[in-house]
Amino acid sequence: MKAVLPQNETVRIQTLRQYKILDTPPEAAFDDLTRLAAQICGAPIALISFIDESRQWFKSKVGLDIQSTSRELAFCTHAILQPHNPLIISDTLLDERFATNPLVASDPYIRFYAGASLITPQGYTLGTLCVVDRVPRQLSSEQIQALQTLSRQVVTQLELKLYLCKLESITATQHQQIEYLISALDHDLRTPILANRNTLYAMLGGAFGSVNNSYVDVLEDCYQANEDLLRLVEALLNISRYKTEANKNLKYEILDWKNIFIQATSHVATIFQQKCTIKYKIPDSLPIAYGKPLEIQQVVQNLLNNTVELSKLNQEITLEVRLAEFETIKILVRANGLEIPYLGKEMLFNGLIQGRGRHNIDKLGLYLCRQIVEAHKGTINAESIPDEGTTFWFTLPITSLKN
């Protein structure tokens, strides 16, 4: 049976191609959402599928081994025809559209299907987030609401990947494009994430009816994932804005290291609830350095966040500032006994493609640190020595920075 096509099929396919998602490797950000969908809906199979000209391709899958199916056989082909309402088939054998479908009559023996469309900010439907079962059944209204919320999270991940790729190709002469990107990122990505936050919070609070205890932990995980994504977008916005503003209004002040360390330590203690013991060392006699205090504090805070995140409970961390060679001061965030593989400056501090790399390192945050430090005429790096520890550090010149 030939698949029925959406009215905007040509533009829809073009839009799908722009995201460059087809035939890409599995990614944790998408797999987490698929697993959440399966858990919330109590389904053995969950899929993130994209519909191109001839096939249904699975970016992420739980409980299914195949990578794609013919578009003519795909349930999601029908789901994208009604983008604003989930397609729910309680019993496929009672629906003439699917009763003789090979996916029903043979493996994986689909008897139940529920799919929420993946709708771009421009209104194009690229595919679905769907759950499948091998027995007839229903979903509760809370489960349907959660499936739709998770489908919006999938689109948010797509938008984030797209903006990251665009940022990579931006040069210093393209400030107008960056400003447009910031506006689009703020409206098309941050706004839906905030909406998802409100929806998830309301669901947890019982606004859509009482939530079964078995779903509470899953919804809380989903809420936390949304918060993590919001922080990632905020970091991306900061990077975008910094690229347009780094060379403007450079009004430096004398840096008060005691205040910077206290503020950074206080912020980290709030997030990690005294996970580690943090000490700082500031010499009584230290040459004056100039900079933008809030930005330098952001660098210290980000390096400290990464160090605490990687550290064990009750590990001691030291913040230190000291005189270094070549008329510079050096700021160090050191954890004795902590060891991570040395990645090098170009990988560790240039992470536009991944929000968090291996070992849970915040690569976007470290990339922003590099932008700030280099705008201050400094350098940044990290060292990890077996049996000794790991140190994030950056330098600032003690002359020529005052504006």
Image (cartoon, rainbow, N blue to C red):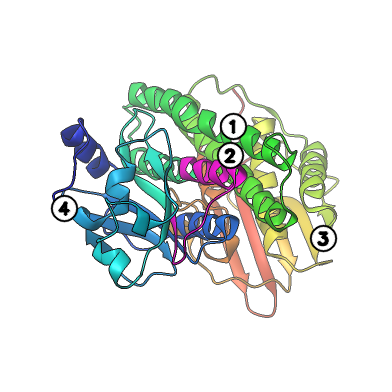
Foreground tag (1 vs 3): 1
Q: Is residue 372 toward the left or the right of residue 257 in the image? A: left
**Do the residues under discs 1 and 3 have CB atoms within 8 angstroms?**
no
Q: Are marks 4 and 2 in contact (CB under 8 Å)?
A: no
Query: Cα distance, mark 4 to mark 1?
Result: 35 Å
Counting from the top left corner in percent of width and height, residue 182 is at 44, 27
- The residues colored magenta run 131-152
Q: Residue at x 29, y 58 (%)?
A: 99
Q: Are marks 3 and 4 in contact (CB under 8 Å)?
A: no
Which amino acid, mark 4? Ser
Disc 1 from disc 2: Cα separation: 8 Å
Query: Which is more N-terminal, label 3 or label 1?
Result: 1
Q: Is 346 located above or below residue 19 in the figure?
A: below
> Depth-wise, is mark 2 or mark 3 nearer the camera?
2
The numbered mark at residue 230 is 2
Q: Amino acid at mark 3?
A: Cys
Find disc 1 in the rendering and name its residue: 194
Which residue lies under the disc numbered 3? 276
